[in-house]
Protein backbone atom coordinates (compact mmCIF):
# COMPACT_ATOMS: atom_id res chain seq x y z
CA UNK A 1 0.00 0.00 0.00
CA UNK A 2 2.91 2.36 0.62
CA UNK A 3 4.82 1.38 -2.51
CA UNK A 4 7.66 -0.33 -0.64
CA UNK A 5 8.96 -3.70 -1.77
CA UNK A 6 8.06 -6.52 0.64
CA UNK A 7 9.49 -10.03 0.87
CA UNK A 8 8.34 -13.08 2.82
CA UNK A 9 11.09 -15.29 4.29
CA UNK A 10 11.53 -18.61 2.50
CA UNK A 11 12.60 -20.38 5.67
CA UNK A 12 11.21 -20.03 9.18
CA UNK A 13 12.26 -16.69 10.68
CA UNK A 14 11.36 -14.69 13.77
CA UNK A 15 9.98 -11.92 11.52
CA UNK A 16 7.03 -12.20 9.09
CA UNK A 17 8.18 -9.80 6.37
CA UNK A 18 11.17 -7.87 5.09
CA UNK A 19 10.23 -4.38 3.94
CA UNK A 20 12.44 -2.12 1.85
CA UNK A 21 11.89 1.32 3.41
CA UNK A 22 13.66 4.60 2.62
CA UNK A 23 16.03 4.04 5.57
CA UNK A 24 16.87 0.43 4.63
CA UNK A 25 15.49 -3.09 4.84
CA UNK A 26 13.47 -3.71 8.00
CA UNK A 27 12.35 -6.95 9.67
CA UNK A 28 8.61 -6.69 10.35
CA UNK A 29 6.46 -8.73 12.72
CA UNK A 30 2.73 -8.66 11.82
CA UNK A 31 0.13 -8.84 14.60
CA UNK A 32 -3.66 -8.59 14.71
CA UNK A 33 -6.17 -8.30 17.50
CA UNK A 34 -9.90 -8.59 18.01
CA UNK A 35 -9.65 -8.22 21.81
CA UNK A 36 -11.36 -4.96 22.72
CA UNK A 37 -11.19 -4.45 26.48
CA UNK A 38 -12.96 -1.69 28.39
CA UNK A 39 -9.77 0.35 27.88
CA UNK A 40 -9.45 -0.27 24.14
CA UNK A 41 -7.81 -2.70 21.74
CA UNK A 42 -5.17 -4.95 23.27
CA UNK A 43 -2.69 -6.98 21.24
CA UNK A 44 -0.19 -9.67 22.14
CA UNK A 45 3.19 -8.56 20.82
CA UNK A 46 5.15 -11.45 22.27
CA UNK A 47 5.80 -14.88 20.84
CA UNK A 48 5.89 -18.44 22.16
CA UNK A 49 9.29 -19.91 21.36
CA UNK A 50 9.94 -23.63 21.63
CA UNK A 51 12.23 -23.96 24.64
CA UNK A 52 12.70 -27.72 24.55
CA UNK A 53 10.84 -28.51 27.79
CA UNK A 54 7.28 -28.03 26.55
CA UNK A 55 6.76 -24.60 28.10
CA UNK A 56 5.25 -22.13 25.63
CA UNK A 57 5.22 -18.87 27.64
CA UNK A 58 4.57 -15.59 25.88
CA UNK A 59 7.99 -13.98 25.54
CA UNK A 60 8.96 -10.51 24.30
CA UNK A 61 10.87 -10.20 21.04
CA UNK A 62 14.48 -9.18 21.51
CA UNK A 63 15.52 -5.81 20.03
CA UNK A 64 17.93 -7.51 17.62
CA UNK A 65 15.23 -9.87 16.24
CA UNK A 66 12.82 -7.42 14.57
CA UNK A 67 12.69 -3.74 13.68
CA UNK A 68 8.96 -2.95 13.37
CA UNK A 69 5.54 -4.22 14.40
CA UNK A 70 2.77 -3.86 11.82
CA UNK A 71 -0.50 -4.22 13.73
CA UNK A 72 -4.17 -4.31 12.72
CA UNK A 73 -6.82 -3.80 15.39
CA UNK A 74 -10.44 -4.95 15.22
CA UNK A 75 -11.48 -1.64 13.61
CA UNK A 76 -8.86 -2.29 10.88
CA UNK A 77 -6.70 0.61 12.03
CA UNK A 78 -3.10 -0.02 11.03
CA UNK A 79 -0.12 0.76 13.24
CA UNK A 80 3.58 0.73 12.39
CA UNK A 81 5.42 0.70 15.70
CA UNK A 82 9.20 0.56 16.12
CA UNK A 83 10.17 -2.56 18.05
CA UNK A 84 12.22 -0.52 20.51
CA UNK A 85 9.01 1.35 21.50
CA UNK A 86 7.61 -2.00 22.71
CA UNK A 87 10.85 -3.38 24.17
CA UNK A 88 10.14 -6.01 26.80
CA UNK A 89 6.35 -5.99 26.28
CA UNK A 90 4.26 -9.06 25.54
CA UNK A 91 0.86 -7.31 25.46
CA UNK A 92 0.03 -3.66 24.82
CA UNK A 93 -2.97 -1.36 24.82
CA UNK A 94 -3.00 0.18 21.33
CA UNK A 95 -4.49 3.52 22.34
CA UNK A 96 -1.18 4.16 24.10
CA UNK A 97 0.49 3.97 20.67
CA UNK A 98 -2.13 5.97 18.72
CA UNK A 99 0.58 8.28 17.35
CA UNK A 100 1.92 5.27 15.39
CA UNK A 101 -1.42 4.73 13.58
CA UNK A 102 -0.83 4.97 9.82
CA UNK A 103 -4.35 4.62 8.46
CA UNK A 104 -7.20 2.19 8.03
CA UNK A 105 -7.56 -0.92 5.91
CA UNK A 106 -11.35 -0.76 6.19
CA UNK A 107 -11.84 0.29 2.56
CA UNK A 108 -9.70 -2.63 1.37
CA UNK A 109 -11.52 -5.22 3.44
CA UNK A 110 -15.15 -4.17 3.78
CA UNK A 111 -16.83 -2.25 0.93
CA UNK A 112 -19.55 -0.98 3.30
CA UNK A 113 -16.86 0.95 5.27
CA UNK A 114 -16.17 3.18 2.26
CA UNK A 115 -19.55 4.86 2.53
CA UNK A 116 -19.30 5.61 6.27
Image (cartoon, grey):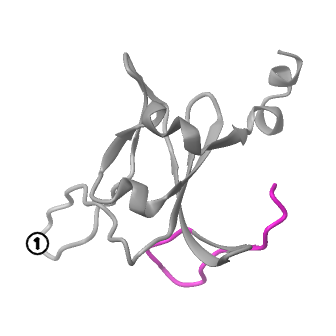
- Above or below, comparing residue 98 to residue 6 in the picture: above
The image quadrant that residue 19 belongs to is: bottom right
Kindly identify the residue that appears in the image at 88 percent across and 17 percent down. 115
Q: Look at the image and say whether residue 11 sits in the magenta stretch.
A: yes
Kindly identify the residue that appears in the image at 40 percent across and 62 percent down. 84
Front residue of 28/112: it is 28
The image quadrant that residue 47 belongs to is: bottom left
Residue 39: x and y in percent read 38, 20
Kindly identify the residue that appears in the image at 78 percent across and 73 percent down. 5
- Above or below, comparing residue 83 to residue 105 in the picture: below
Q: Which residue is mark 1?
A: 53
- Above or below, comparing residue 94 to residue 51 in the picture: above
Q: Which residues are magenta?
A: 1-16
- Above or below, comparing residue 85 to residue 37 in the picture: below
Looking at the rendered structure, the number of numbered marks drawn on it comes to: 1
Residue 36: x and y in percent read 44, 24
The image quadrant that residue 16 belongs to is: bottom right
- Is 19 positioned to the left or the right of 107 in the image? left
Q: Would you say the magenta stretch is mainly helix, strand or loop?
A: loop
Residue 107: x and y in percent read 82, 33
Kindly identify the residue that appears in the image at 43 percent across and 35 percent down. 96
Q: Look at the image and say whether residue 81 sits in the magenta stretch.
A: no
Q: Residue furthest right?
A: 115
Amino acid sequence: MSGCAVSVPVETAVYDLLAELPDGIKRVQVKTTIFNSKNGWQVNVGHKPHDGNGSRRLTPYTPDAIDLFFIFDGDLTMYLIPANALAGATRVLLRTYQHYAIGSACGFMLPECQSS
